[in-house]
Image (spheres, grey):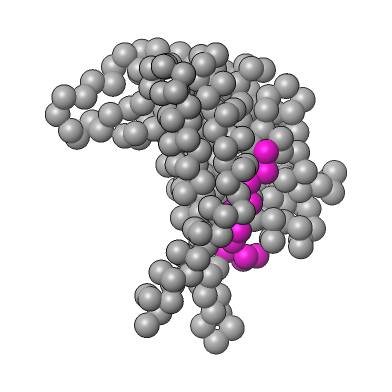
Amino acid sequence: MAINKYVDNVIELIRDIEKTQKCKLEKAAELFFETVKKNQIIHVFGTGHSHMIATEMFVKAGSLANINAMLESTIITNSGARKVSMIEKLQGLAEIIWNQYEIDKNDIMIIISNSGRNSVPIEMAIKAKAEGLKLIVITSLNHSQNCESRHKSGKKLYEFGDIVIDNRVPAGDCLMDFNGIKSGSGSTIAGSLIVNSILVETLEKLIEANMELPIFGSQNVDGFNNEDLYNKYQDRIKHM
């Protein structure tokens, strides 16, 4: 059955990420730890479907409260999928989006792009590096290293990352073949696994350092109150 094959492929993908990206996940967790320790912000950016990884991290039960998802309506699919596919190729837009947020040079940024070829995420990476931020990139190297950049520099997103995490998804983001038609997406599952792996490793480091865990509790479980965390970060996190 196709269901079984897809599940097998996803499990294989997950194990591949665990095996090949573990060291980079640990390095990313160290960056997260230092950012929490310094009371700085983790900014997360992705265009198109990649924005779902930013949403996965943002104001969610069990997630860090110092995460700022850059959920600008111009670059996420609810504003129109075809429109976004054109907008993410526009040069000059990243600077405009950047200026809508409170971003400090001691913050860090994560940029997610499966292909890593479009102008907006590339220019966001260039801006982050120019402003002195440490940059984590989540991308498919299989895809990115085998396509042409759509940015005037000729470079791809992974070329700007301080830490580059390969989601190990094949070009085209599909794990299955149906008579030449590709389907069975892997990037969202891979991206969610990657960021949550970084998260739990960060929490372990915070516990080892006897530090408080700035973690949101579920709004749907009695006994949790997130107001202190909202109040602490709302002036620096736009969509909170």
Q: Main secondary structure of the magenta part?
A: loop
Vertical relation: 151 (above or below) 211: below
Residue shown at 72% from the left, 52% from the top: 117
Nearer to us in this view, 89 or 231? 231
Percent position of residue 213, x then y: 38, 22
Does 161 sit above or below residue 154? above
The image quadrant where one finds the C terminus is: top left
Q: How many marks?
A: 0
Looking at this view, name the residue that lies furthest to the front. Answer: 208
Q: Residue at x 69, y 50 (%)?
A: 116
Residue range corresponding to the magenta coloring: 163-173
Q: Does 35 appear above or below 141? A: above
Residue plotted at (78% across, 53% down): 149
Q: Where residue 197 sits: x, y (%)?
A: 47, 42
Q: Residue at x 60, y 58 (%)?
A: 168
Horizontally, residue 148 falls left or right of residue 100, namely right
Measured as percent of width and height from the top left, residue 206 is found at 45, 23
The quarter of the image holding the N terminus is bottom left
